[in-house]
Amino acid sequence: MSATPQTKAALINALRLEREALEQILQRLPAELLAEVMAQSAIWTARAVTLLFQAGRSTNVQLPRCSAEADAREVAAQRERPLAHLQADFRAAHAQLLKRLEAWGDEAALFNPRRFPSLRGQALADYIWSWVGVRDAECRARLEKLVQP
């Protein structure tokens, strides 16, 4: 896993760059793969938005209860939706994440691993980066292997 960027500006920039790189690969995917990638990414980005929203209101944030099985069910349910709706959610969730990060006032709290006890010694920025930036990068790397000529 790549290291979490250490300033708010660097985090926002890195998230933007990873998403732009992922979107470049997505343009070359068939619809069935596109739907799954966008659904999965939108789900994890929405979780990061929710976590950031909670953190803005309280130090008692709740991590989502996730499992591979639950994630697979959620993605499968999303795949049934029209591709245009999945694309809209994919982009809207990321835009909302960047908007919330840009508006975040206490940069030190974002990177302080002790600020939110329920995050078990990790900084809020670490969760956001691993759930969105790292996932986007890992997904892009897997997809690049599939779409190479």
Image (cartoon, rainbow, N blue to C red):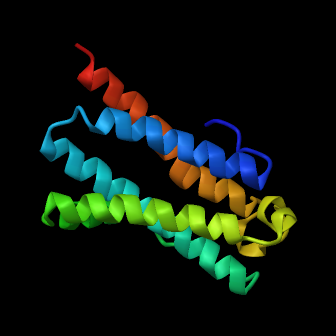
- Residue 4 location, x and y as percent? 70, 45
At horizontal 38% and vertical 59% (from top left) the residue drawn is: 91
Q: Answer with left or right where residue 88 lies relative to residue 8.
A: left
The image quarter containing residue 48 is bottom right
At horizontal 37% and vertical 41% (from top left) the residue drawn is: 23
Q: Answer with left or right where residue 110 lies relative to residue 37.
A: right
Q: Answer with left or right where residue 87 lies relative to residue 132.
A: left
Seen from the viewer's position, the closer of residues 91 and 46 is 91
Seen from the viewer's position, the closer of residues 76 and 25 is 25
- Residue 73 location, x and y as percent? 25, 65
Q: Eyeballing the image, is 146 above or below 25? A: above
Q: Answer with left or right where residue 138 lies relative to residue 70.
A: right
At horizontal 52% and vertical 52% (from top left) the residue drawn is: 132
Can residue 27 be spotted in the picture? Answer: yes
Q: Eyeballing the image, is 29 above or below 43? A: above
At horizontal 14% and vertical 46% (from top left) the residue drawn is: 32
Q: Eyeballing the image, is 29 above or below 6? A: above
State which quarter of the image contains the C terminus.
Answer: top left
